[in-house]
Amino acid sequence: MKKLAINGGKKIRNEKFPAYNTIGDEEREAVLRVLDNGKLSRYLGAWHEDFRGGEEVRALEEEWAKYFGVKHAISVNSATSGLYCAVGAAGIGLGDEVIVSPYTMSASATAPLIYNAVPVFADIDPEYFIIDPESLEERITERTKAIIVVDIYGHPYDADKINEIAKKHNLIVIEDAAQAPGAMYKGKMAGTLGDMGVYSLNYHKHIHSGEGGIIVTNNDELADKLRLIRNHAEAVLPGKGYDDLTNMIGYNYRMTELEAAVAREQLRKLPGLLDSRLENVKYINEALKDLPFLQLPKVMDDCKHAYYVHGIKYDEEVAGVSRSKFVEAVKAELMEFELRETEGVKIGAGYVKPLYLLPIYQNKIAYGEDGFPFNQECYKDVDYSKGICPVCEDMHFSQMITHEFMVPSMTIDDMDDFINAINKVWENIDELK
């Protein structure tokens, strides 16, 4: 029996794992190209030929639209900004409700609040962790105006069922595909399955430009509104001759030429990087498939997963110790990733706490100290109490394990160290009891 590192034994690994760094000579040359021409941005907040940005921004948008098979791609400075633009373009306002997932990055839920609407949380599916269509439909009221679905971990949402529900209730579907570029649903790209889709180019995503995001849509009217909200809509409307003033307070959500140049090179790398993730997940799944206390991720029929992270379900009853104890023991056997040392070993118990348990929802205070917009009469029945999404709570507090040892920078030896750490803790589980 090997003594566990958490109890003073020898670690499985003492070297940091290699950084997931997709930046190379191509990106360096692209940045130098922009620096040499001196045009770091070409935006003007007015109706002008530069309203839509410079050469790199426009080229990125054209290339992104072609790759993902959509009519419009609109670059922004983050996926968060993209979600805010999408909610604004959907015409959301005070008195409206938007159904969202509780198991995602916080911006997916705060996006309605930007326009004085409120999020309503639907539960997640226990097998795929995407928003559950049945729970979603139960949450629809006369105030519901849109749905923000999330392709969590890289698995596309159940588009057939949710789009049908949306059509029946005349709702707009905004797809948060930040974790799923290249994922597929029945032959269609994730991000293109709803009325609008949002991708992330944040530094730890599949591909990145440091910060950045892309919104896609096939709807000309929505595309116009998205571009206006991105770039000082209120100042642009007179020159453009645009009459619809709904949510036409614009922002500066513009991407720079430097970011766009990097993103163009990154987009070319996406297919290979995605293939590497799939190969690595296959290797890890094969190695862990016989462990009785773990359930490896499932993928819906006719879908392709993008594996932003690898989500595994943990059975505490079979293991005999809590998930948290088990994960802490595995962490003690391993090391951090280069360039991300401050984040600790990249395996976690849970993912994010159900969003409705954050102080903003528990105290129902967003704008001002009086609780606007939650204090409005129209929102008196909106419920954020613990227990409203039991599957999500169960996943977060007891079952879900997420890790990133399947990113393309991992070698077979790197993944073997992760696998051996799991096996070592399991073989010596009595040390934790």
Image: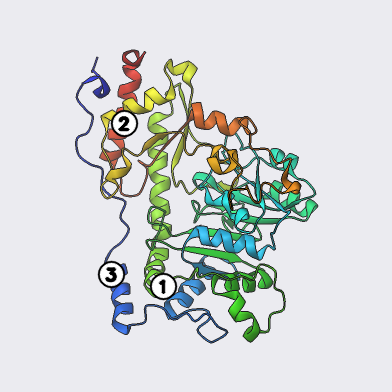
Relative to 165, is 197 above or below? below
Please name the residue that numbered disc 1 is placed on: 256
Q: Quadrant of the C terminus?
A: top left
Q: Earlier in the sequence, mark 3 or mark 2?
A: 3
Asked whether, in this view, residue 129 is left or right of residue 13, the answer is right
**What is the number of the mark on residue 331?**
2
What residue is at 27 percent from the left and 50 percent from the top?
339
Q: Secondary structure at mark 2?
A: helix
Sequence order check: which comes first, mark 1 or mark 2? 1
The quadrant where residue 329 appears: top left
Going by the numbered disc 3, the residue's amino acid type is Arg
- Its colouring scheme is rainbow
> Which mark lies nearer to you, 1 or 2?
1
Q: Position of residue 370 (x, y in %)?
A: 62, 48
Q: Amino acid at mark 1?
A: Thr
| SS class, disc 1 | loop
Q: Nearer the viewer, residue 16 or 426?
A: 16
Q: What residue is rendered at 48% in x and 49% in y? A: 306
Where is mark 3, residue-wise?
A: 28
